[in-house]
Image (spheres, coloured by chain):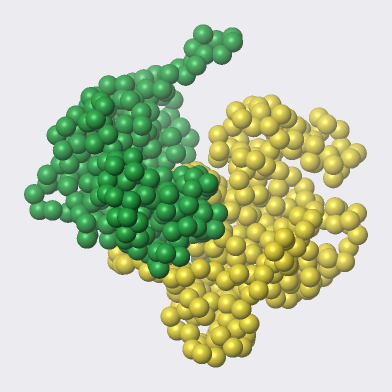
Chain colours: A green, B yellow
Amino acid sequence: MTGENKPILQMRNIHKVYKTKGNLFRSSGKDVIALNRISLDIYKGEIFGLVGESGSGKTTAGRLIVSLEETSSGRIFLDSHEVTALKGRALKTFRRKVQMIFQDPYQSLNPQRSIYDTVSEPLKIHRMGKTSDRKDRVREALKAVGLSPPDDFLYRYPHRLSGGQRQRVAIARAMILNPEFVIADEPTSMLDASISAQIFNILLTMRNKLGVTQLFITHSLAAARYLCDRIAVIYRGHLMELGRAEAVIQSPRHPYTQALIDAVPKFGHSKDARRYGTLLAKNHEAREDKGCIFYPRCAIADDHLCARKAPGLTEIATGHWVACFRQGSVESSLTPFSYGLAEGR
Amino acid sequence: MALLEVDNISIGYHTQKGYLKAVEGVSFVLEKGQSLGLVGESGCGKTTIGMALMGLLPPNGSVRKGRILLEGRNILTMSDEEKRHIRWREMAMIFQAAMNALNPVQRVGDQIAEAIRVHNPSLEKGAALSQVEGLFDLVGIPRERLRDYPHQYSGGMKQRAVIAMALACHPKVIIADEPTTALDVIVQDQILEEVRRLQREFNIGIIFISHDISIVADMCRDIGVMYAGQLVEMGPWRAVFESPAHPYTKALLSSFPTLTGEKSDLVPIPGETPNLINPPIGCRFCDRCPEARTFCKATPPQWVDMGSGHQVLCFRS
């Protein structure tokens, strides 16, 4: 990360509601709040991790940023231009600067197009370079993602590539326009560990050598720890905790983050594994639409405060933000993790 | 006598491109109430072994060689009738992708009751349903969800229902094939805890198949690491993961991000897995192995005993 934290992307009060259709018998179901007034900054040159479970709204956030979808309210700025207001030519320029890598490389590549066609298509769309130059640029992009010699791959079709190779083609395609900002939405969830590590390292090189800012969307705290400078933890559309990756993982302050860390299978390094025990075995009864979103599952919740009022994000240490009334008391529940179960098997 | 013994088994599939040797010469033993983890990446043959144990290989697949002994009886030489008798009653499977393992147009309770009655025809439907209630209590699904359809269940609840179905006939062996891959980490943790508890309570032997080393390390006493259709390392989990002997195990461990300990660089494994229609003569990992020597390519490696049940299929150890 660069020393002067200059934001490249700013999200301000982003709200996204999906209206559910009613069926024949009911007029309308309940609206789903995918993102609830999210505000965050992503700094130039950093890899920012958005961590959450399925349905937490992390993918929605990515899709809103590349304006594949429209926000219900709130504003997104890239380089201080408002993304949410872009139209026509300006939108096309924006789409050159911001690229997305999708989760499933088996679905994100067109099976009827050769690798060359796929990777060079963005150049055609944005009328960049002459036809002869394009081939060189594609070769370079393929080399950069470790598909070499590139000429072996140019005229192959996706079905002849493995999952890891496909995802590298998807990255080459995203990188060919020299974007400033790349969103990687669970880029390795379909891949084996040894192949995932390749993809992680390509993303790291992209940042270190080319200074590409990235939003890395993942469900895996371990992957986020490896890759990201800062992490935001999101739960059911609410931002719960945000801070430097090591701080969030080594000393999480929100009970939900702590519950997530508890749930990751501990393996190796059992000595520095701890247990927080902040997840309730049996859910609290929640009052409707009031209180903290995590209250029903929170073991350290205050029945009066947390059930009635939703906590806002508060900065508890430089750059470490937590949305929890009880975050001060969390530390005390920290007990040494015992490997008792593991020994008993 | 071991609960389950797999002895030098080889399994293959007839494909358009030729005969694919999916599993070659795999042997392991599962004792009563113990857990064995088979870990490896996609295409290493771990699911094929699970399917062969259950007698559920697809029509183009067959066991070419070896024996599968369930309490001393060879499953492979049994008649279909005998196999059906064993399946679910003595050996059950928790399938990958619980989302698709349930019939969408039948109530969950009815499906499990039906499974019970198939294996115990004299049982009344009402009695079977009350057994299902007991199973729901066991796996932690509220009884009132008995009459729901699968689509009304969350992912974690479907997985619990599939576990309930596996437990329905009180099997001695359960094969759990990636039982939690589609689940979120908190739900996964709860399901794994449930499996552990049920295993202890009923003294079930579990074969846990997964690509995720952290899960098998957490769940299993013994670990078998598979690569390209072969077991390459085998032993108690601590030995295998804390002092791995096979270069593939080492490589797999160092490509895996962790939450604890020093943050170190992840090292990807270069190259691709070999083609199993024409597998290499020598070590199958040697093309990707940082420690390979010339003779690794020429001759197949032999098992080396590392002591206290820890074995490795490699020349270099």
Q: Is residue B148 left or right of residue A51?
A: right
Q: Is residue A174 left or right of residue B308?
A: left
Q: Quadrant of the C terminus of chain A?
A: bottom right
Foreground of the two, B10 or B138:
B10
Foreground of the two, A227 or A203:
A203
Image point (16%, 38%), residue name: A79
Image point (17%, 41%), residue name: A8
Q: Quadrant of residue A63?
A: top left
Query: x, y (%) of residue A18?
Result: 41, 22
Q: Is residue B174 visible?
A: yes
Image height of B211 relative to B7, above or below = above
Query: x, y (%) of residue A266?
Result: 43, 59
Image point (70%, 76%), residue name: B25
Foreground of the two, B252 or A140:
A140
Image height of A286 relative to B314, above or below = above
Query: x, y (%) of residue A147?
Result: 40, 63
Q: Quadrant of residue B150?
A: top right
Q: Quadrant of residue B59?
A: bottom right
Q: Quadrant of the N terminus of chain A?
A: bottom left
Q: Is residue B311 visible?
A: no
Query: x, y (%) of residue A261?
Result: 37, 50
The furthest residue to the left: A4
The furthest residue to the bottom: B295
